[in-house]
Image (spheres, rainbow, N blue to C red):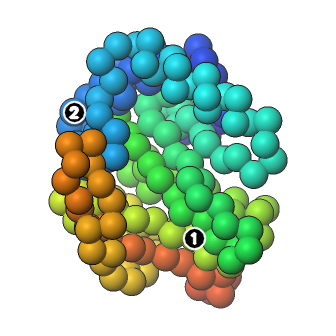
Amino acid sequence: RLTLRRFEIADAQAMFDNWANDPRVTRHLTWRPHGQVENTRALLEGWCAGYERADYYNWAIVCGGQPVGGLAGMRLNERHESVELGYCLGYDWWSRGLMSEAVCAVRDFFFAEVGVHRVEICHAPQNPASGRVAQKCGFVREGVLRESQKLPDGAFYDLVVYAMLRREWEALKQNT
């Protein structure tokens, strides 16, 4: 149903239209909706430049031939063999199972190809749908980091932490 691929600068208009300018999508994120497609294009220029690094992971989620969201290995910690996933999906594609499908694929990639020991997902408690994605993909809720993130308006908010360990992923793969 979907394809994960590298972002391209040519994705700017679709990204802007499908999620980057939508306050429903960005309301629980650390960045505000983009006011102009030029903001999205500038962001994509930085992301595309990041692909020069071997440890840079940022995918466009493509459905029906257009980018509808993004999924990134935001913080790869080589010393601790862990990575945190972050994701965003356009409102028109919510509640279709697309994000769970994408997260499961990227989770498998990080364990099988990159060789991490731990994959994490963090989300705002006010965004329980992100927690449901983590649960559907087999992640375990570990707790809450109190007031650990700061929003653009200066307010601090909590993060709910989910994680999966390599041994849990291996057991999951043996049972499927």
Look at the image and tell me whether residue 175 can be seen: no
With 136 as the anchor, is 131 left or right in this view? left
Q: Quadrant of residue 52?
A: top right
Residue shown at 68%/77% (left/top)?
Answer: 80
138 and 85: which is toward the camera: 85
Residue 140 on image: x %, y %: 43, 81
- Residue pictured at 27% horizontal, 74% vertical: 146
Quick one: label 1 or label 2, which is nearer the N terminus?
2
Q: Circle 1: is it few (<14), some (14-19), or many (20+) Cα within 10 Å?
A: many
Q: Position of residue 94 (x, y in %)?
A: 30, 43
Where is residue 168, by image quadrant? bottom right
Q: What's the mark number on residue 69?
A: none
Describe residue 36's horizontal placement relative to residue 112 as left or right. left
Residue under circle 1?
Answer: 119
Residues 9 and 169: in front is: 9
Q: Is residue 92 above or below residue 109?
A: above
Q: Position of residue 6 (x, y in %)?
A: 66, 33
Q: In the figure, is residue 72 to the left or right of 31?
A: right
Image quadrant holding the C terminus, namely bottom right
Q: Residue furthest front?
A: 154
Amino acid type at circle 1 is Val
Front-most of residues 61 and 29: 29
Mark 2 and mark 1 in contact (Cβ < 8 Å)? Answer: no
Q: Quadrant of residue 44?
A: top right
Report the residue marked by disc 2. 23
Dot 2: what SS?
A: helix
Q: Residue at x 51, y 17 (%)?
A: 41
| Residue 20: percent from left, percent from top | 36, 28
Work out how far the residue at label 1 is from the one at label 2, CA to CA, in angstroms: 28 Å
User: Is residue 50 something one can see in this rendering?
Assistant: yes
Which residue type carries mark 2?
Pro
Above or below, 27 relative to 138: above
